[in-house]
Image (cartoon, helix red, strand yellow):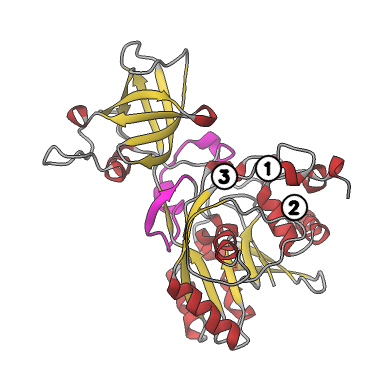
Amino acid sequence: MSGADEAAAYDYALPEEAIAQRPLARRDAARMLVLHRATGQIEHRHVRDLPEYFQAGDLLVSNDTRVRPARLVGRRKETGGRWEGLVLAVEGPSWKLLAKTRGRVQPGERIVLVDREGHDAAELVMLDRAEGGSWLAVLDASASQAGSADSGGPVDADRVLERIGRVPLPGYIRGGVEHPGDVERYQTVFARAAGSAAAPTAGLHFTPELLAAWEARGMRQARVTLHVGLDTFRPISTAAIAEHPMHTEWCTCPAETVAAIEAAKQAGRRVLAVGTTSVRTLESAARSGRLEPFSGTTDLYIRPGFSFRAVDCLLTNFHMPRTTLLVLVSTFASREAILAAYAEAIEQGYRLLSYGDAMLIV
C-alpha cells in the first residue's frame, strides 16, 4: 500500500443513525461481534457471553481511569457572554483547558462558572494561551463556593469538578450535552483514578455480575491506568499514516499486573485487554522487548508492522473512521478483517462508538 492512500484505506461509511446516542438500560446487554483472527469467522453474541470464550487462568486487564466531569459552563464576568470550557489536565494549581466563546478572551479575564442547577459557583482566571489552542487558568479560591479547602488552602480541582462539571461526552453524542444518567453511565465499574477527558469505552459494558461470572470460571483480573486524552479521537491528518503526529497520554502498568501477565503466559493462558487504552498501556510497558512495570507518558503508535508482546485478545468498541484507534485494531487483526466486520456490524444494525456495542477479537 503506497503512502499516498494509506489513510484513505482506514475510512468507511459511518451512517449517522448507527451512532449510539444513549446507553442501553443494562451494560452487558450490548451486542458483541466476535471476530476470530485466524479464520475471519464472525459470530454475533452479547457482552454477557464474554466468559464463554475464555478458560481458567486467562487474565482480563482493564483500565481503571476515572473520567473527570471536565465540561464547564459559565459566562464572561465583564461582558456576560456565554462561555464553555473543557478541562484537559490539572497541573498543580493550573488548569489546562479548551475554551469556546464569542469574541477573544484576554489574559487576566474572569469567567463565572455555573453549577448544574444554574447557580454561580466559582470564578476562573484565564492566565495565558498554551499549545494547541488551549488555555492555562486558575480557580480563584476566594470566589469559589464549589469545593475550596475549608482552611483557605489550595483548591482541590477534582472536588470542584465533581460539583460543577458536566460529563465530557463526545460531540457525536447529542452534541455533547449531558442528560440524566450520563454521570453514572459514562463511568466504568473499574473507575478509580481521576484524570480522563473521555471514557475508556470498552469498559462501559461491564457489570459486577459479569465480573463475578468471569471469576467463577477461574479467570483472573488485573488493572492498568491510562488517562484518555481528547487527541485519541482526532482523525489521521496525513496521507501516510506513519507521518501523523501521535499524541501522548499518561499511563501506568504496575508490578502486580506485570506479575499476573507473566504467570498467565507461563501457564499457556491468554491475556484479554479491555479496550485500546489497556492495549496501549500494556504494549508501552513491553516496548523494550520485555514486559516490565511502567509509569509515565507514552507516544506509542500501533500501526502495521507492530509486534504485540503482551496482548492476546481484545474487547473493544467500534471506532471512528481514519483514526489511530481504527489503525490499532486493524493492526491487531487485519485491516481487511476489521473493515469486513465493521460492514457486517452496520448491516446488522449494531450501535457504534462510545455508547455503542462491542467487538471481541480472539
Q: Determine the residue located farthest toward the front in the rendered image.
A: 288
Q: Position of residue 267 (x, y in %)?
A: 59, 89
Badges 2 and 1: C-beta atoms under 8 Å apart?
no
**Image: 215 above or below 251:** below
The span picked out in magenta is: 171-197
User: Which residue does the numbered mark 1 point to in the structure image?
Assistant: 17
Badges 3 and 2: C-beta atoms under 8 Å apart?
no
Please tell me which of labels 3 and 2 falls first in the chain.
3
Query: Label 3 sits on what residue type?
Result: Gln
In which quarter of the view is residue 230 placed? top right
Q: Determine the residue located farthest toward the left in the rendered image.
A: 151
User: Which residue does the numbered mark 3 point to in the structure image?
Assistant: 21
Query: Label 1 sits on what residue type?
Result: Glu
Tell me the crowding category of disc 1: few under 14, some 14 to 19, or many 20 or more residues within 10 angstroms, Cα based: few
Q: Position of residue 240 (x, y in %)?
A: 79, 42
Residue sitting nearer the eye, 59 or 175:
59
**Which quadrant is home to the C terminus?**
bottom right
Q: Position of residue 248 (x, y in %)?
A: 55, 47
Residue sitting nearer the eye, 95 or 31:
95
For the residue labelled by badge 1, is the local secondary structure a helix, a strand or a loop?
helix
